[in-house]
Amino acid sequence: MSDHAVSPAWMARQSDVDAIVGGRHGDPFAVLGPHDTPEGPVVRAFVPHAEFLDVVDSAGRAVARLERRDDAGFFEGLLKGKAAKLGRRYVLRATNRSASWDLIDPYAFAPFLGSTDDYLLVEGTHRRLFERLGAQLVEHEGVAGVNFAVWAPNAARVSVVGDFNAWDGRRHQMRKRIDSGIWEIFAPGVDAGAVYKYEIVAADGRLLPLKADPFGFGSEMRPSTASVVVRTDRFEWTDADWMARRPGDDRRRPMSIYEVHLGSWAKADWGRFLTWDELSDRLIPYAAGLGFTHLELLPVSEHPFDASWGYQPIGLFAPTRRFGEPEGFARFVDKAHAAGLGVILDWVPAHFPTDEHGLREFDGGPLYEHADPRRGFHPDWNTAIYDFGRPEVVSMLCANALFWLERYHIDGLRVDAVASMLYLDYSRKEGEWLPNEDGGRDNREAVAFLRRVNELVYGLGTGAVTIAEESTAWPGVSAPVYAGGLGFGFKWNMGWMHDTLDFMSREAIHRRWHHDQLTFGLLYAFAENFVLPLSHDEVVHGKGSLIGKMTGDHWQKFANLRAYYGFMWGHPGKKLLFMGQEFGQWAEWNHDKSLDWHLTDYPEHRGLQSLLRDLNRVYRDTPALHARDCEQEGFRWVVVEDRDQSVYAFARFGEWGDPPVLVVSNFTPLPRDHYRLGFPRAGRWREILNSDAACYGGSNMGNGGEIRVEERESHGLPASAAILVPPLATVMFEWVGE
């Protein structure tokens, strides 16, 4: 039937029928569903495989039969009598030669989203997008189902496809919200566990590869790539006390972080990934037993490629299916809190992979990524870069940060690759980057985005923290936004890490020529709120393990590492150690394998592990070692220029009334007997840690557990003592009284 043929006015135009059947209609709600016409109410529906379609009332009685206008399954009919009074509350009953089934018409429902959602998205200030976009399990107009919503402003048509509609893009063609470019449809009867993607027709008519939901809260196990309908707002948390205690000044609290790649911390039988519950039962008590205060998890957002370690995420809102259902991740966090462990997530807003089911050219062209490849493509990682100048993209990323904090009670976000975001010329040659409006290389849009995220996170007032992996001298990374900073709580001290590891890799006899590598960091130690990281990046790509970096024979390697850990735990700054380094794994980290847990059967490895446990205990229980980590007043050099003997000594201070601590390190294999040191005050000083103790695998040299400090000036301090400094060791003393 042509549009010019004589037909009743209530009937759909043939061009509309053809567009619906062909999956090319830009406004399906204008055609399908219930409509009022001068002749009366009309119902139109597209139900493939149906030969007959009846309108059914609430009692299950067929009150009208719709005419099949197209054999593909387009039906319509004018409702009369009782049928005309049903309004939007009707059921469709489809019948063919082999079956009969009932369905609620998705086109009978008004929009779920409102104009405020449109406005805030376009403005870039929508903080609750995770409650509006994606697959929301809701009751809409008295009917249970899922409201699907996705931002694709340049698309000619968007459909949600899944098992519930036989992956037929003609079945749930979505409504476009013109003011925002959001497409939405309420799908009645769809429930948790449903698998889905978006089928998108670009503005030029191209049918794009099926796309996973940018706001998908669950996903399939790789290599499958579909999103999964998941409820994230019904978990019964038991961590109310933990959450109530969390607000406060984290700069003055102990923070010792155990960095973990969940897929390779340990494996189950036959190389299987541990489940969230198995990780809860094994990892959490292990880390808590070693005295760490936090777990930092390499990205758990869904990612298609294991070897990316999670740093190329596709599903920013979905905990990876590798370890089980999203609710399992919530249980993991809840149990961590019960054990006294905070959970920090690696968060990756710096780039995203170009897999065809992901964000790349989401609606047919650049959308989430910057349109200019000089800003929208990262040559190092072969990934796309978010367009931080687009308000809708900023809204999505900010909402994602808040999502993990609110829905999963995450205690902090470590933001990956911040430097790559701050500099427009990062890893680019001349002519490969696009300057800012003033010709400079600072990415002002990314700066504004990072400040916005930090303002939102700290504005929650829940005690969640942000940590920047920032490897340059960008000023004020951890300074408040109101003071011109980026607003992070902490910054990784990459300079300290590189300098100190280089020092430790040198033979002891040569260290006198590199003495400053251990002292230089104190020139800027209080310019930021620092975390001292010994991260995964230092034990991959041919860098070897930490124990492998140490010099000397077998005993000396362990002694060096013990001394280094002691120096690090005494040094100002919060602590971070990557898994496996707590017991001295020899092999470089391999993401495909479990850690070499069998090494803990050997005494030298167990000794190192015991040292870490005691270091964490001493650090946590001694205010002088953590309360003023970020303040100059918490530190004083005592011995800083003893290059020939490679001895370093410094005092640490807490608040008024907290006993001071003196830390002394000897980075040569020669003991230093009768070594006179200045002390902040006279009296009894207890040896609270000695990395050379026999229980750690050391030579058991020391000072009998306590020294008497006399009122004799030395090193600019009013008191002093001559002590024994063990070989390749760090010793800590705490004042205990007169």
Image (cartoon, rainbow, N blue to C red):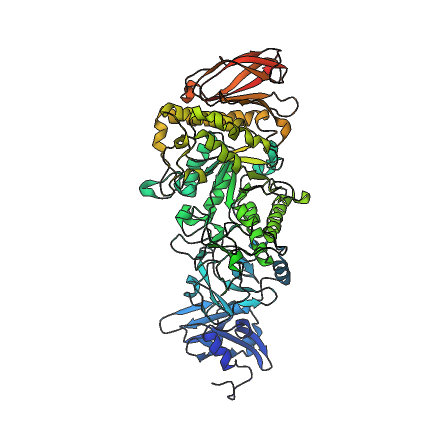
Residue at horizontal 45%, vertical 45%?
A: 328
> Is residue 65 in view?
no
Residue at horizontal 42%, vertical 38%?
A: 539
Q: What number of labels is visible? A: 0
Residue extending furthest toward the left: 270
Position of residue 709 relative to residue 116, above or below, is: above
Camera-nearest residue between 184 and 671:
671
> Is residue 28 in view?
yes
Camera-nearest residue between 405 and 255:
255
Q: In the rendered view of the protein, which quadrant contains the C terminus?
A: top right
Camera-nearest residue between 501 and 387:
501
Relative image position of residue 508 (x, y in whole percent)? 43, 24
Residue extending furthest toward the right: 482
Relative image position of residue 639 (x, y in whole percent)? 56, 21
Residue at horizontal 59%, vertical 62%?
A: 113
Position of residue 89 relative to residue 225, above or below, is: below
434 with respect to 562 (left or right): right
Camera-nearest residue between 88 and 509:
509
Position of residue 322 relative to residue 515, above or below, is: below
Position of residue 479 relative to residue 615, above or below, is: below
Relative image position of residue 690 (x, y in whole percent)? 48, 20
Relative image position of residue 134 (x, y in whole percent)? 52, 58
